[in-house]
């Protein structure tokens, strides 16, 4: 039974700084990537990155290119060459990774000098790209056959030759290797929902995600605590302190009708009593979002929403609680979808997107949560409870997005041993969600942020939040 109750959100705290990611973790990731290349009969892997789409490269090297693009070349023998432009030559990964680095000035911004680097053809040829060589290209996405099929209704599955690297690179690779079939999209190696390399996380990465989730949720909580009628969106933005972490998306604060444009950045717009609101802060490894009403209770709502909004957001919280109760190591993602769909009142709202997804250095890595999905949730996965309701009645908002990790007994033991303070925060969050909010959690579910499951429907009454337990 979902209801509103007096809820005091505890101070869970956070680490003084983000835990480091040891170089041996990156070296192991490169070794695992080379093993996947061999299993896929790929001779060379080409990992491309730009400012917006750098998660695969950063996963392997720690480099998220600034201003420019970058390219990592790996071969089956373990050779590794990193190409960067002018400005990233001063922003390189640690030398312990064993990367050879070469300046490729076509990655530099327009107007900068380009006289000091070799042509890409020479670089690729010297690295071993030639006739008959099989090259895997890693960009941002992999694509379904229907994207390129002549009859889009008859073909599905993966299209290996649909590649999202720049055309000049792909054209050159195909020319050097002797044909289109020798150059394939290999992005699924990193992000496919079943066993992609970036889908299963090490304890070192989970500890970093826990710090990121603490930062993101603390920032959103500060914004919520300062919302008042008359406050401007851009006056709240500075409260979203990212602690120097790389943003995974732009900061978001919106009031009133502008909240329909959920991804909008803060503006000079001011809050009015009864407004819908939405806000979010995303840093690499986490995003926290809250949405609701600028109100102290239903009496502050408009005549149009006064009856609808309480039912809308209460049903939303029931769906959220069902998601947390269904996810666990060993759960089938399609069955998680069924569990949340069973709680959704179709007269109140639809799902805007999948009910939840994987998260990594990028905000949305992939999602297994779809009807009929047979993906089994595994230990080491980092997941977002990212259920966005689209009202079927008058416009209103609800959101309670936070992240979790899944961990079997062995991973829980490693986290408790190697990151005891992090582990204690996770245990306090689990206790809050189960004992205060009444949301049952499997032992494998590890809440990472500092607003776990907490949803006050009226932001001017933050001490009143939803719980999923009956009156006692």
Image (cartoon, rainbow, N blue to C red):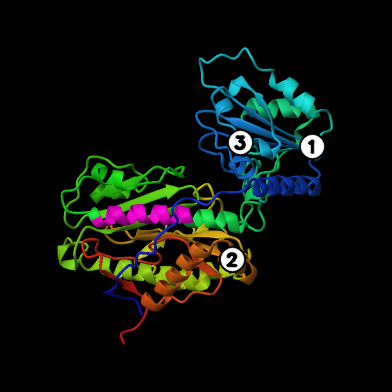
Q: Which residue is mark 2?
A: 417
Provide the major secondary structure of the magenta segment: helix
Q: Which residues are magenta?
A: 211-225
Q: Between marks 3 and 1, how big is the CA–CA gap?
A: 27 Å
Q: Which residue is mark 1?
A: 134
| Residue 308, percent from left and from top | 26, 66
Q: Residues within 10 Å of mark 3 (few under 14, many from 20)?
A: some
Q: Secondary structure at mark 1?
A: loop
Does residue 229 sit above or below 234 in this rendering? below
Residue 252 inside the magenta-drawn segment:
no
| Residue 220, percent from left and from top | 34, 54
Which mark lies nearer to you, 2 or 3? 2
Q: In the depicted view, which residue is nearer to us: 304 or 125?
A: 125
Q: Quadrant of the C terminus?
A: bottom left
Q: Secondary structure at mark 3?
A: loop
Q: Secondary structure at mark 2?
A: helix
Q: In the depicted view, which residue is nearer to us: 243 or 459?
A: 243
| Residue 393, percent from left and from top | 29, 61
Q: Which residue is mark 3?
A: 93
Q: Between marks 2 and 1, how big is the CA–CA gap?
A: 43 Å
Residue shown at 54%/74% (left/top)?
Answer: 443
Which mark lies nearer to you, 2 or 1? 2
Residue 217 inside the magenta-drawn segment:
yes
Does residue 62 sit above or below 271 in this rendering? above
Give the mark nearer the N terminus: 3 vs 1.
Answer: 3
């Amino acid at each position: 039974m979902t209801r509103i109750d007096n809820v005091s959100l505890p101070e869970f705290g956070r680490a003084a700084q983000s835990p480091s990611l040891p170089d041996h973790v990156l070296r192991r990731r490169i070794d695992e990537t080379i093993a996947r290349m061999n299993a896929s009969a790929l001779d060379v892997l080409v990992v491309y990155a730009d400012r917006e789409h750098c998660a695969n490269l950063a996963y392997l090297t720690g480099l998220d290119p600034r201003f420019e693009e970058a390219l990592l070349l790996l071969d089956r023998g373990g050779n590794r060459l990193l190409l960067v432009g002018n400005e990233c030559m001063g922003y390189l990964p640690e030398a312990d990774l064993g990367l050879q680095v070469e300046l490729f000035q076509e990655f530099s911004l327009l107007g900068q000098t380009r006289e000091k680097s070799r042509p890409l053809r020479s670089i690729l040829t010297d690295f071993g790209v030639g006739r008959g060589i099989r090259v895997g290209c890693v960009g941002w996405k992999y694509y379904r056959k229907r994207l390129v099929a002549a009859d889009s209704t008859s073909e599905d599955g993966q299209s290996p030759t649909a590649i999202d690297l720049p055309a000049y690179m792909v054209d050159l690779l195909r020319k050097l290797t002797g044909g289109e079939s020798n150059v394939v999209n290999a992005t699924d190696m990193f992000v496919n929902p079943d066993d992609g390399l970036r889908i299963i996380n090490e304890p070192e990465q989970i500890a970093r995600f826990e710090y990121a989730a603490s930062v993101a949720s603390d920032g959103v909580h500060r914004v919520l605590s300062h919302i008042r009628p008359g406050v401007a969106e851009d006056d709240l933005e500075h409260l979203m302190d990212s602690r120097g972490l790389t943003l995974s998306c732009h900061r978001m604060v919106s009031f009133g009708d502008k909240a329909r444009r959920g991804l909008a950045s803060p503006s000079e717009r001011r809050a009015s009593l009864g407004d819908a609101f939405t806000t979010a802060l995303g840093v690499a490894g986490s995003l926290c979002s809250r949405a609701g009403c600028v109100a102290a209770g239903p009496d502050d709502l408009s005549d149009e929403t006064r009856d609808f909004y309480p039912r809308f957001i209460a049903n939303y919280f029931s769906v959220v609680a069902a998601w947390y109760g269904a996810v666990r190591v060993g759960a089938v993602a399609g069955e998680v979808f069924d569990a949340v769909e069973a709680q959704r009142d179709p007269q109140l709202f639809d799902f805007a997107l999948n009910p939840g997804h994987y998260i990594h250095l990028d905000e949305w890595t992939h999602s297994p949560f779809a009807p009929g999905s047979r993906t089994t949730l595994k230990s080491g996965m980092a997941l977002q409870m990212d259920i966005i309701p689209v009202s079927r009645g008058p416009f209103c908002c609800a959101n309670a997005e936070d992240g979790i990790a899944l961990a079997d007994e062995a991973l829980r033991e490693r986290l408790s041993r190697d990151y005891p303070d992090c582990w204690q925060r996770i245990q306090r969050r689990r206790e809050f969600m189960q004992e205060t909010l009444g949301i049952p959690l499997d032992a494998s579910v590890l809440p990472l942020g500092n607003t776990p499951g907490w949803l006050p429907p009226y932001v001017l009454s933050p001490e009143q939040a939803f719980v999923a337990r009956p009156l006692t």
